[in-house]
Image (spheres, rainbow, N blue to C red):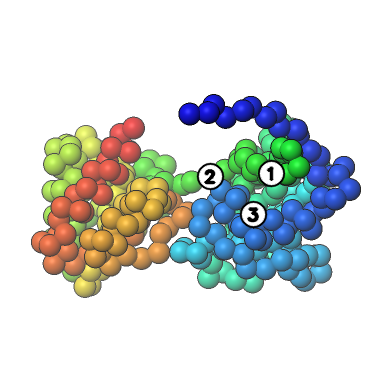
Amino acid sequence: MTTPSYVKPELVSLKDHPEFSEAWLQDRIADDPKILGLGDVVFRDRERLQPRAGRLDLLLQDAETRKRYEVEIQLGTVDESHIIRTIEYWDIERKRYPQYDHCAVIIAEKITSRFLNVISLFNGTIPLIAIQVQAVKIGDSISLIFSTVLGEVQRGLVDEDEDAESAPTDRKYWIDKGDKKTVALADQVAEIARTFDPQLELKYNKFYIGMARNGKAFNFLALRPRKAVLNLDIGLPETEETTAKIEAAGFDCLDYDTRYSNYRLRLSGDDLKTRNEPLSELIGEAYRLRTG
């Protein structure tokens, strides 16, 4: 077997190159949006007109969750104006189309530590992703390497002492809000969770029923009994493998909650009887993730 020869790549500045413009980079991303590493995203629009605010470079959308990404591109080093513009376009789009989740994305050839710190400040309250692009020349060909230098902050289930609105309630509150049968389903889910940790118990809060251990909040599940079903949020990152497992089991699944990184299932009594094993696997994965 012949050993592949080593070819030293040559970094190319798109900003200083006479043939590679911002429009050229937009073309490459529009042709194959997955090269950004944002998942299964598709191209929606380009040079999208913004009321009294210029044009958005690219609009991408997740093929499954329908989450939208407002993308701004800058050749060379990122600067203040492009950061502001990225956030402004994201804000306009999310107000125009509130039915979608939105995330701002800024792409530049160089993102300095100074501006990375500034972007990080916004990232705590604004869903913002910063991607650095490098153009690499190998022979007569050009390749692009996209590296995420700042990812979107993922918010998991908050523990009770971190959530000022999760006022304690009791079992009767949820029976009145939902139904005895669906609260009983929550008990069955808790029994499954206890197979992984016997100390786990239900913790009744105003907006959800969480999990507790030794009297302290230990959330990796959130349960919301309704009149006919039990809504269950499972704290797991969205992956093709987990999604396929849920679909194969035949669960009634709501859209993935990207804000809090939860799979959302609607459970009936039949689910606890016929889908107990796959449900137990999902709960076990979430528990192990929670315990680190």
Secondary-structure class at tag 3: strand
Could you say which is closer to the camera, residue 25 or residue 172? 25
* Dot 1 crowding, Cα within 10 Å, few <14, some 14–19, many 20+: few
| Residue bearing the label numbered 1 | 143
Specify whether 81 is left or right of 131.
right
Specify whether 36 is left or right of 176.
right
Q: CA distance from mark 2 to mark 3?
A: 12 Å
Query: Which residue is found at the position 53% from the left and 70% from the top?
Result: 99
Callout 3 amino acid: Ala
Visible residue check, residue 229: yes
Vertical relation: 222 (above or below) 7: below
Disc nearest the viewer among 2 and 1: 1
- The earlier-in-sequence mark between 3 and 1 is 3
Query: Which residue is found at the position 61% from the left and 57% from the top?
Result: 32
Secondary-structure class at tag 2: loop
Q: Give the number of the disc on residue 153.
A: 2
Could you say which is closer to the camera, residue 82 or residue 178? 82
Q: Are marks 2 and 3 in contact (CB under 8 Å)?
A: no
| Residue bearing the label numbered 3 | 104
Total marks in image:
3
